[in-house]
């Protein structure tokens, strides 16, 4: 984003992206839905180089995902979520037997 007037700007953009991606579509006559998570990092507050900004966005994504999951299900990852990749790898697949 070229100029951010408020922290609401990137949050609103992320929401619009997620809503657009969430629109159902057909694959081989099957209604399919996907979702997306967005981690937000803003320079210079969260870092000044690309690597640091990506790390901070990764942490933001994981924190948001874990907050949602923990609120809904308790700690489903056993505390193994240090990056978004670890967070995703730690999540149970939908339909897995949780017992």
Image: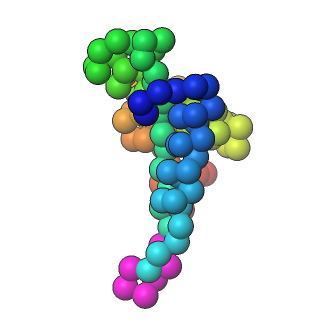
Q: In the picture, residue 63 is in which quadrant?
A: top right
Compared with 92, 84 (above or below) is above
Query: In the current view of this chain or complex, which residue is farthest to the right?
Result: 71
- Tell me if I can see residue 82 in this picture: no
User: Looking at the picture, how far across and down is residue 78, in whole percent?
Assistant: 54, 30
User: Looking at the picture, how far across and down is residue 70, in whole percent?
Assistant: 65, 36
- Residue nearer the viewer, 3 or 35: 3
**Total marks drawn?**
0
The residue that appears at 68% across and 43% down in the rendered structure is 73
Query: In this rendering, would 19 be left or right of 45?
Result: right
User: Looking at the picture, how far across and down is residue 15, in whole percent?
Assistant: 58, 46
- Magenta segment: does it hold 30? yes
The residue that appears at 42% across and 17% down in the rendered structure is 43
- Residue nearer the viewer, 29 or 38: 38
Visual colour scheme: rainbow
The residue that appears at 52% across and 71% down in the rendered structure is 24
- Magenta segment: does it hold 51? no
- Tell me if I can see residue 30 in this picture: yes
Query: In this rendering, would 52 be left or right of 42?
Result: left
Q: Quadrant of the N terminus?
A: top left
Q: Which residues are magenta?
A: 27-32
Principal SS element in the magenta part?
Answer: strand
Compared with 57, 13 (above or below) is below
- Residue nearer the viewer, 84 or 6: 6
User: Looking at the picture, how far across and down is residue 98, in whole percent?
Assistant: 58, 51
Compared with 15, 10 (above or below) is above
């Amino acid at each position: 984003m070229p100029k951010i007037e408020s922290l609401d700007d990137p949050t609103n953009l992320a929401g619009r992206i997620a809503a657009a991606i969430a629109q159902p579509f057909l694959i081989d006559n099957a209604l399919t839905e996907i979702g997306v998570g967005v981690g937000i990092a803003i320079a210079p507050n969260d870092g000044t180089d690309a690597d640091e900004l990506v790390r901070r966005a990764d942490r933001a994504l994981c924190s948001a995902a874990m907050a949602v999951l923990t609120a809904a299900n308790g700690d489903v990852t056993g505390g193994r979520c240090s990056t978004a990749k670890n967070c995703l790898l730690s999540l149970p697949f939908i339909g897995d037997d949780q017992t």
